Amino acid sequence: MSIDARGAEALNAEAPSRELVADVFARACSSRAAFEVVTGKWASLVLLALVEGPHRFGELRRLVEGVSEKMLSQSLHALEREGLLTRTDHGVVPPRVDYALTPLGADIATRLRGLADVLQGAVSDLDRSRADYDA
C-alpha cells in the first residue's frame, strides 16, 4: 500500500460518520432549525438591533419598524430557545426586561451585519433592478 493510500485510509478512519456531521440542508438537522429562525425577517432584524447592545422590548419594537408585538415576542422567544439571546427580568415594578446577545448570537449578528451592509450599499442597484424587472 502506498503512503498516500495509507494516509487517505487513516483520514477516513478518523472522519466522523455521516450521522454525526451537521448538515443545514438536512431536514432533521438542528442547525437547519436554527438557520430557519435566524433567517426569518423579524429575527434577523432583532439580531441586528441587539448588536448595538442590550435593549428592552419597547426599544426593539421602535427600532424594528413594522414588527407587531406578537411577531417581536415570537422572534425573541425563538432566538432565546436557540441560545442566541438572553432575557433578563429585573423583577421590579414597573417590569424591566432586557434582551442581549449571547456570544453565539453576537457572532451570528456580526455576520448578518456584513450582509446588511452589502445590501445597504447596493440600494441603487437593487432599486434599478426592481424597476427594470417590473417594466
Image (spheres, rainbow, N blue to C red):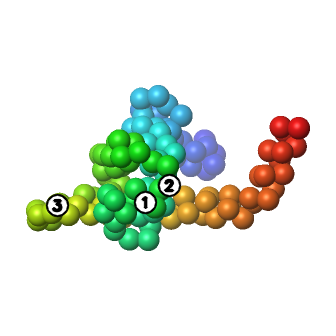
Please give the name of the residue rendered at 49% of the width and 49% of the height, measured from the top-left corner. 66
- Image position, residue 37 (x, y; %): 43, 42
Please give the name of the residue rendered at 40% of the width and 56% of the height, measured from the top-left corner. 61
Q: Amino acid at mark 2?
A: Glu
Q: Amino acid at mark 1?
A: Arg
> Do residues under tags 1 and 2 come within 8 Å of each other at their CB atoms?
yes
Q: Is residue 18 above or below residue 14?
A: above
Depth order, front residue of 15/6: 15
Please give the name of the residue rendered at 87% of the width and 43% of the height, measured from the top-left corner. 132
Label 3 crowd (10 A; few <14 / some 14-19 / many >=20):
few
Q: Amino acid at mark 3?
A: Pro
**Disc 3, SS:** loop
Residue at image mark 1: 62
Depth order, front residue of 80/97: 97
From mark 2 to mark 3, how far is it between C-alphas? 23 Å
Mark seen at residue 35: none
Depth order, front residue of 57/15: 57
Residue at image mark 2: 65
Mark seen at residue 95: 3
Depth order, front residue of 90/94: 94
Would residue 103 appear left or right of 9 to someone viewing this image? left
From mark 1 to mark 3, how far is it between C-alphas? 18 Å
Would residue 37 appear left or right of 123 to someone viewing this image? left
Task: Point out the tag, 2 or 3, that comes first from the N-terminus.
Answer: 2
In the picture, the quarter occupied by the C terminus is top right
